[in-house]
Image (cartoon, rainbow, N blue to C red):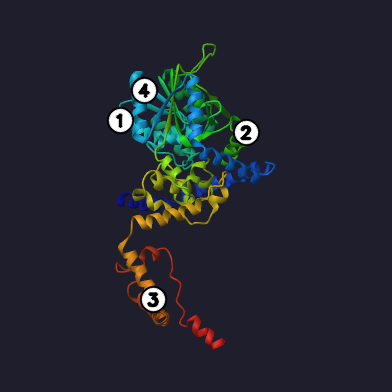
Amino acid sequence: MKSNVKNFKAAALKSSSDLTRRRLILNALRNFEVTRNQKQALFQDWGAARELAAAKKWDAILNLDKNIELFTKKLESNGAKVHWAKDAESARSIILQIIREKKAKLIVKSKSMTSEEIHLNDTLTRAGFDTLETDLGEFIVQLRGEGPFHIVFPAMHLTRGEIRELFQSKLGDAPSDDPEALTMVARRFLREKYIKADIGITGANFAVAETGMISITENEGNARLVSALPRTMITLVGIEKIIPRLDDLALFLPMLATAGAGQLISCYNTLYSGPRRPDEPDGPSEHHVILLDNGRTKVLADPVARDLLRCIRCGNCLNVCPVFRNIGGHSYGAAYCGPIGSVLMPIIAGIEQWYHLSYASSLCGACTEACPVKIDLHHHLLKNRRTAAKTIPVWWQKLAFKIFNLFACSPVLWRLMSKSGWFLQFFYVWSVKGTCLDPAYPWTKTRELPPIAKETFREWYKKHE
């Protein structure tokens, strides 16, 4: 627990002190905001679309048991094999078993935050399998030995020059820092891997219960190659991704594109319904779909927290969060960062390990306003803080509030404290402020304490009555 908090504070301090990197992120997100707002304005009524999307996802969550049953039945009738994973360990075990049965050597992956959640890449690498991310941003951060910086834009923290140096070092090919030239370098390298790969692993943006289909949204076409060329396809799906009807995608696909990438619609939206049919030219011979719980049913059982299962992973709450903008995604040290990560991680991964993330927020409410499915994120952050205060009490905080309660409930002691407050503050500033004995140093090292007035309000009121 302490190591997570310590690592977060150290990483946040380092990131926030890097002014060049902060300017890069701020400029990128400001430009994104302009594009996103332009696309939102093209909706007939963006507010009404949010209301409808929230209602549809809420209905899907409240009927999750029926939707899962129908989805599984339809998918299996299409020829896919469905696996159930209670937690991250069982999901990794299922995937490893499939890989070993197929005697696979090379595995290609499309972008999947769910696989980041279960730390799949590390597991496959330790098991001796060559695993390659094919999304350009994910490919770049994988070459750097990093996790994604952002849910949607994994490499947004890097400059073109840094990417060129990386490609030159790792791939031996980087003709210039032109984005198109760098993309072609990655394309030449990855195309060979697609052809040689034994297994392709994907995530899912949505899963349609009515038809038993997996919906994958992307802008590069790499997910199509990952699913079309290898003989075996594995799809890892969080159970909250299931929606009831195919018609629902008519709303969710443009909303995801607008909120997530500032587009009217993503370049590639593909539906998968099992392995290749005899009359189809490409596709996998086997399609395995793993339905992942990993704490989601625990969230579902909480009448307040189940609201979080509506999330469509657009990343818009990260884009508007002032904390994320200044400390970046890597500081969180978690699979999910930003406001949604600060809310989800303490619930699905343990409040004892991740309680500090709920305090990494200004509670400004910008995340709630930006969420396309109207998740009340800043109130969930407050709820997690209350849970943390009850679960992980800090003795000196409890003592401080007991002392405050004693003074606050006694008019005599309160007047005494009010009269002597300015003198005590003067003594504090003169003697202990900024020293190792300063109890308020975590606050005063970056802020000034407001001065206490020599005259109390009660005294002022009597004088001017």
In primary-sequence order, the first of circles 3 and 4 is 4
x 57%, y 50%: residue: 369
Residue beneath disc 1: 126
Which badge, 3 or 1, comes first in the chain's sequence?
Answer: 1
Of label 4 and label 2, which has the lower sequence position?
A: 4
Q: Name the residue under label 4.
A: 98
Q: Pointers 4 and 1 in contact (CB under 8 A)?
A: no
Q: Nearer the viewer, mark 4 or mark 1?
A: 4
Q: Which of 257 and 153 is in front in this view?
A: 257
Pinpoint residue 407: horizontal percent, then vertical percent: 38, 76
Name above or below for residue 246 compared with residue 160: above
Locate the C terminus by quadrant. Answer: bottom right
Between the residue at mark 3 and the residue at mark 1, the CA separation in whole angstroms equals: 58 Å
Q: Distance between the residues labelled 3 and 2?
A: 59 Å
Q: Which of 397 and 151 is in front in this view?
A: 397
Residue at left 64%, top 42%? 49
Judge depth for marks 3 and 1 and give the one in front.
3
Name the residue furthest right.
44
Q: Mark 3 points at which residue?
A: 407
The quarter holding residue 280 reads top right
Q: Quadrant of residue 267?
A: top right
Whether residue 178 is visible to the viewer of this picture, yes or no, is no
Cα distance between the residues tagged 2 and 1: 41 Å
Q: What residue type is labelled 3?
A: Phe
